[in-house]
Amino acid sequence: MEEEKKVRLYVFVGAYGSGKSEVSVHFAHKLKKENPDAKVMLADLDIVNPYYRSADAKEVLEKEGIRVIVPEYANTNVDVPALSGEVYSAFDMPDTLAVFDIGGEDLGARVLGAMLSRFQKIEYRVFMVVNAFRPFTSDAESIKLMASELSEAARLPISGLINNSNLLEETTEEELIEGEKVLLSAQELTGIPVVYQTGLDHVLPESWKEKTPSGIPVLRMDRNVLYKY
């Protein structure tokens, strides 16, 4: 039986306002925590939206030993940042685990097209971050449409859905359950599995410490520590 190749690259896509940058930051933190001896890098490839970038967490992540690559001119007054050539090191360094935070919707996902040949030589996963309380991903049909558009733009298949359904600090357990139902319906419709449930650490129920009641692994997030607006 052929040994399963280790995933070395995780790509996060999603609609505007899905929270993918925040999820990307915490996923990089998770990788480093689980693989303390490994080299972990986070590449902010969001050259579309100058706000709420994963680059904003650069200082905090680098203190944890996570290498952060940001668009040239990120966090400056230059309108259109450019990708750094350092991004390609994610494909060339077999001892590195990498996270790519991709710009909003299909326009941002197109940045991956230039790297298509590189993806064919590495084990990767593309995760679509979904907030079911956002207008363009509020039901299974719209999630399916968004997933199709993102996959077509990126020219890569989406491996999993990440349920980031929330109303910020006001999110209740009932709303978390409601969001999960939408994502599970999308899973049934698309065939794309829900791989993580996210949530702010102080919002998620204590009983959801590792998994939701339906068995979805939980990625707990602490905005005050890891992601500052």
Image (tube, grey):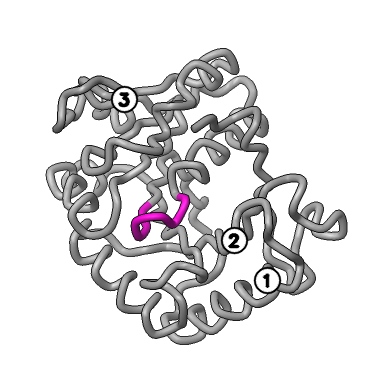
Does 16 appear in magenta?
Answer: yes
Span highlighted in magenta in the image: 13-19
Helix or strand or loop: what does disc 2 sit on? loop
Q: CB atoms at circles 1 and 2 under 8 Å apart? A: yes
Q: CB atoms at circles 3 and 1 under 8 Å apart? A: no
Q: Residues within 10 Å of mark 2 (few under 14, many from 20)?
A: many
Residue 34 in view: yes
Say what amino acid the circle numbered 2 marks. Asn
Helix or strand or loop: what does disc 3 sit on? loop
Comparing 150 with 74, the one in front is 74
Q: Nearer the viewer, mark 3 or mark 1?
A: 1
Say what amino acid the circle numbered 3 marks. Val
Residue drawn at 51 percent across, 21 percent down? 66
Q: Could you tell me residue 173's position as x and y percent?
A: 76, 67
- Picture quadrant of residue 163: bottom right
User: Which residue matches tag 2?
Assistant: 166
Does 122 appear in magenta?
Answer: no
Comparing 214 with 202, the one in front is 202
Residue drawn at 46 percent across, 47 percent down? 5
Compare marks 1 and 2 and give the one earlier in the sequence: 2
Q: Nearer the viewer, mark 3 or mark 2?
A: 2
Q: Could you tell me residue 123's position as x and y percent?
A: 38, 47
User: Which residue matches tag 3?
Assistant: 70
Q: Give the answer, above or below, for where 189 lies relative to 22.
A: below
Comparing 95 with 201, the one in front is 201
